[in-house]
Image (cartoon, rainbow, N blue to C red):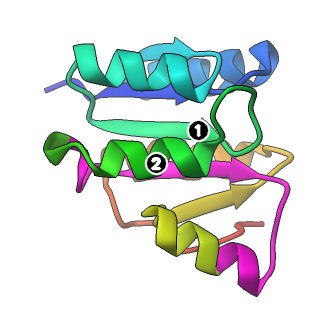
Amino acid sequence: MTKHILVVDDNAASRARIQEVLTVAGMSVVVAENGMQALLIAKSERLDGVVTDQVMPMMDGCHLCQMLREIPAYRQIPIVLLTTEAGPAFQEEMEACGVPVWLEKPLTEQKLALIATEMLHPSVATKTKAA
């Protein structure tokens, strides 16, 4: 069964790059430009995973994750958050938001491969800022 993944990023180039990697890995991908748009998509489609940027207009990635985790169908799906932030306070914030995996930007080929792996095999990645 093909995984249906939502990619959320206000940067069109980042969205396209992640979409390409996931599509090549055999997944169907829907994209959103911000958290509000993503939440509307999540309420109208059944998703198997989410890759979201943290800093976006209208609703950031953490808030989006909190909202998704309130929807019963999305309590356990894999979510990968992309960020430029780090540190213990940020890690606590991500745990409070229900984000199990986050990757620091910029996105390298290794990080893009980790995103695809996490969408196909949840929990392969750990709470991380992968190299």
Specify whether 33 is left or right of 32.
right
Mark number displayed over residue 52: 1
User: Which numbered disc, 1 or 2, marks the residue closer to the eye?
Assistant: 2
Quote the CA–CA distance across marks 1 and 2.
9 Å
Camera-nearest residue between 131 and 11: 11
Residue at disc 2, secondary structure: helix
Say whether disc 1 or disc 2 marks the residue closer to the N-terminus: 1
Mark 2 belongs to which amino acid?
Cys
Residue at disc 1, secondary structure: strand
Q: Are marks 1 and 2 in contact (CB under 8 Å)?
A: yes
Mark 1 belongs to which amino acid?
Thr
84 within the magenta span: yes
Task: Say which residue label 2 marks.
Answer: 65
Task: Locate the N terminus by quadrant.
Answer: top left
Specify whether 23 is left or right of 91.
left
Camera-nearest residue between 55 and 110: 55
Q: Is residue 22 visible?
A: no
Residue appearing at x 68%, y 15% in the figure? 16
The crowd level at tag 1 (other Cα within 10 Å; few <14, some 14-19, many 20+) is many
| Residue 90 percent location from the top left of the image | 72, 73
Mark number displayed over residue 73: none
Q: Which residues are magenta?
A: 74-91
Specify whether 33 is left or right of 43.
right
Residue appearing at x 20%, y 24% in the figure? 46
Q: Is residue 129 above or below residue 33?
A: below
- Give the farthest residue toward the bottom: 88
Task: Locate the C terminus by quadrant.
Answer: bottom right
63 within the magenta span: no
Residue appearing at x 42%, y 63% in the figure? 98
